[in-house]
């Protein structure tokens, strides 16, 4: 592949000298073995330079498509570059499901898991928590398989790995019985109710997302995704002053609800309700930047109050913000590592010079609350502060040294935030 390549948002032009899209694992092995600086690329939805390299950028989306079910284990093994949308359709056909999905089904399985991508739901871990085994090409071109079963102590370090240990070729995921979901949208939930009843609101459904544009002291839309065995819309939000929407909604003002998954309580398969956006449309607004900060759930109220103080600065540069909850996990570099988490997400306008100073204010507000930035979105954290937020970082660096002693998979981003590799 030749020519300039950018990420999905178009705000990063990759600086790689060579672009590759291997169509077989042996071809990928040869490229990696012959490279001194290489990075994997999934579907390119990260908003920062995490995937970038000055050497060989290797897209995994051309690898042969694999979707292999293992019935006794209730797992599915998939090619790394497959999108959640394609996988979910195949899973659903087989009567299986994933416990959760992100807001969009367009992203690759390996790329999403590598950055700790998540959806919402008090009891739902990030997408990476479903990973039980990984096959990857390491720096010398070898193909290795690691699994939670074979290495229970080290495996939790290898899933949210930011592409630093190797190029993942296959991922094995735990699956669950398929299920149906009904999606309801409530409008205009006052902040004071959110501050007073955060726990009740976030547990009102299997997955809850609160959207605000910071222009008024209220949650503009609350999206509740309820397992379909409970038929009625959860009554709690109406008691708190919110209104059940009378038609489908898009969370970003001005965008067509036709791009979104079905609402109004119509039951449907898990994969057509858990993401907000439909696979066949552009997700979100399409012209945007994004940031997200994940902090201990118990600090949700303090974070919302702190952000309300800068609502006047946030409103002009925010298309929409989303508040979600995610269950704690044991994955060393996961922003949800060992803490039940609340995520504050920002879909910014696509003007970095206007966004950057406001992002710095958000970071200042949330730093005392020990907010961990989403690895795949924009942040400007002081690397020393960021390192202090990950208690297993030294162990992860040992894995980097073991799997990639010469720093083939390192790049400026990893050197900056995890510390220099060589
Ligand atoms: C519109 C939009 C909506 C989003 N919604 C959400 C959301 O709801 N929740 C959320 O948490 N995030 C969300 N994100 C962020 C997104 O999920 C992450 O950026 C994710 O990493 C994207 O996956 P990708 O395949 O595009 O990764 P890429 O951008 O291609 O790569 C990201 C990282 O993963 C590594 N990587 C990719 N493939 C491999 C591989 N095969 N082996 C090893 N490393 C690999 C890359 O080297 C890089 O470090 C959203 C992004 C967009 C654009």
Image: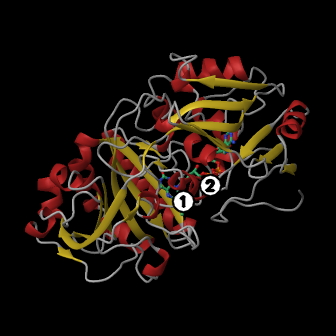
Label 1 beta carbon within 8 A of ligand 1: no
- Say whether residue 113 is left or right of residue 68: left
Q: Nearer the viewer, residue 329 or 14?
A: 329
| Whole-number angstrom distance, CA of label 1 to CA of label 2 | 7 Å
Rate crowding at label 2 as few (under 14), some (14 to 19) or many (20 or more) other CA atoms within 10 Å.
Answer: many
**Disc 1 secondary structure class:** loop
- Say whether residue 327 is left or right of residue 155: left
Mark 1 or mark 2, earlier in chain: 2
- Say whether residue 41 is left or right of residue 151: right
Q: Nearer the viewer, residue 94 or 187?
A: 94
Q: Quadrant of the N terminus?
A: bottom right
Q: Nearer the viewer, residue 237 or 388?
A: 237
Is the Cβ of the residue at disc 1 closer than 8 Å to that at disc 2? yes
Query: Does 349 sit above or below residue 6?
Result: below
Q: How many marks?
A: 2
Residue 111 image point, x, y percent: 62, 46
Query: Does 152 sit above or below residue 320?
Result: above
- Say whether residue 420 is left or right of residue 143: left
Task: State the scheme by which the image is colored.
Answer: secondary structure
Q: Which residue is mark 1?
A: 105
Residue 9 image point, x, y percent: 63, 65
Q: Which residue is mark 2?
A: 83
Quarter holding residue 296: top left
Residue 170 image point, x, y percent: 68, 38
Tell me the residue at 28%/69% (across/down): 184
Rate crowding at label 1 as few (under 14), some (14 to 19) or many (20 or more) other CA atoms within 10 Å.
Answer: many
Residue 225 visible in image = yes
């Amino acid at each position: 592949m030749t020519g300039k390549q950018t990420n999905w948002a178009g705000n990063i032009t990759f600086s790689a000298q060579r672009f590759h899209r291997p169509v077989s694992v042996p071809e990928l092995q040869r490229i990696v073995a012959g490279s001194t600086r290489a990075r994997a690329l999934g579907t390119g939805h990260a908003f920062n330079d995490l995937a970038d390299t000055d050497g060989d950028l290797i897209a995994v989306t051309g690898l042969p498509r694999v979707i292999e079910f293992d019935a006794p284990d209730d797992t599915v093994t998939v090619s790394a570059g497959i999108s959640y949308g394609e996988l979910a359709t195949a899973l659903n056909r087989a009567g299986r499901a994933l416990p959760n999905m992100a807001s969009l089904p367009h992203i690759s399985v390996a790329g999403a898991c590598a950055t700790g991508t998540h959806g919402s739901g008090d009891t739902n871990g990030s997408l990476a928590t479903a990973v039980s085994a990984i096959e990857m090409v390491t720096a010398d071109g070898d193909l290795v398989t690691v699994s939670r079963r074979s290495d229970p102590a080290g495996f939790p370090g290898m899933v949210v790995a930011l592409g630093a240990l190797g190029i993942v070729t296959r991922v094995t995921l735990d699956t669950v019985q398929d299920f149906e979901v009904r999606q309801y949208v409530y409008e205009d939930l006052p902040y004071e109710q959110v501050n007073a009843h955060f726990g009740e609101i976030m547990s009102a459904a299997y997955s809850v997302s609160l959207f605000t544009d910071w222009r008024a002291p209220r949650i503009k839309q609350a999206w509740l995704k309820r397992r379909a065995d409970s038929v009625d819309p959860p009554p709690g939000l109406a008691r708190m002053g919110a209104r059940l929407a009378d038609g489908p909604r898009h969370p970003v003002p001005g965008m067509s609800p036709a791009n979104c998954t079905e609402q109004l309580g119509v039951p449907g398969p898990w994969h057509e309700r858990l993401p907000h956006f439909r696979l066949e449309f552009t997700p979100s607004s399409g012209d945007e930047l994004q940031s997200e900060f994940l902090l201990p759930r118990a600090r949700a109220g303090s974070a919302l109050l702190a952000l309300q103080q800068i609502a006047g600065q946030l409103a002009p540069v925010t298309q929409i913000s989303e508040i979600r909850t995610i269950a704690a996990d044991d994955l060393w570099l996961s922003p949800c590592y060992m803490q039940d988490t609340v995520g504050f997400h920002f879909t910014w306008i696509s003007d970095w010079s206007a966004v950057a100073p406001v992002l710095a204010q958000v970071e200042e507000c949330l730093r005392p609350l020990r907010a961990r930035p989403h690895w795949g979105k924009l942040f400007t954290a002081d690397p020393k502060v960021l390192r202090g937020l990950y208690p297993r970082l030294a162990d992860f660096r040992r894995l980097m040294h073991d799997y990639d002693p010469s720093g083939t998979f390192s790049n400026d981003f990893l050197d900056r935030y995890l510390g220099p590799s060589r």
